[in-house]
Image (cartoon, rainbow, N blue to C red):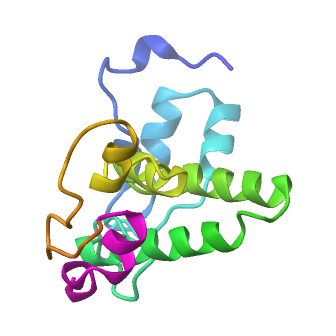
Amino acid sequence: MISQSNKHPQEFLVECLINKDTNSWNHILLEHLFWKDEVQLIQRIPLGDCRNQDKLIWHFTKNGNLSVGSTYHLIRDQTLNSTNTASGSHASRSLSWKRLWKLKVPRKIKVFQWKVCQNILPTTSKLKTRGINLDEVCSFCSAPEEDLKHLFVTCSMAVQS
């Protein structure tokens, strides 16, 4: 579809096409900027409530707020679920990974969660298996062993979060 592009300003936002008082399309401006058939198509697009600001919602909590604690609980639950489904079918594991990568969270959280599920975080137990000589005690609570299960499920510091 080719618009009357010579009438369009270089920087133009959709919100400029909306009458904020009536929360409807600015029909006069649309007719000035677009061809008639384009105006009809644009006016078919329903408008939401423009009076409220958009905000990000973390759908894993009731209040919609992202926190370290809610992320911890999500990762812990995913880790426990992945342990339970480790013997499951390839299809169910593949579906779990697809769901992980589609989560509406920052990429670094997805990568972190993936590393937890793959058991590749550099815990002291994991580093020791790679030949790095470390004291295996937990860095947070001094428990005798620091592995993923301890860090995210049984560590007293993790449970307090």
39 on left or right of 109: right
Magenta stretch: give its range. 146-161
Where residue 127 sits: x, y (%)?
32, 44
Q: In terms of depth relative to the viewer, which is nearer, 115 or 134?
A: 134
Q: Residue at x 24, y 59 (%)?
A: 136
Percent across and percent down for residue 92 are 80, 61
Compare residues 155 and 36 and report the one nearer the observer. Answer: 155
Quadrant of the rendering where the N terminus is positioned: top right
In this picture, is 1 found above or below 72?
Answer: above
Quadrant of res 46: bottom right
**How many numbered discs sit on the rendered protein?**
0
Task: Describe residue 100's horizontal placement relative to residue 90 as left or right.
Answer: left
Q: Is residue 133 above or below residue 118?
A: above
Tell me if I can see residue 59 in this picture: no
Magenta: main secondary structure? helix
Residue 16 can be seen, yes or no = yes
Q: Is residue 142 magenta?
A: no
Give how far across and how far down residue 64 sits, in percent: 35, 79
Quadrant of image for the C terminus: bottom left
Residue at 27 percent across and 78 percent down: it is: 69
| Residue at 53%, 50% in the rendered image | 118
Image quarter of residue 125: bottom left
Is 29 or 41 nearer to us in this picture?
A: 41
| Residue 103 in picture, x, y percent from top left | 52, 57
Q: Quadrant of residue 99?
A: bottom right
The residue positioned farthest toward the top in the image shown: 6
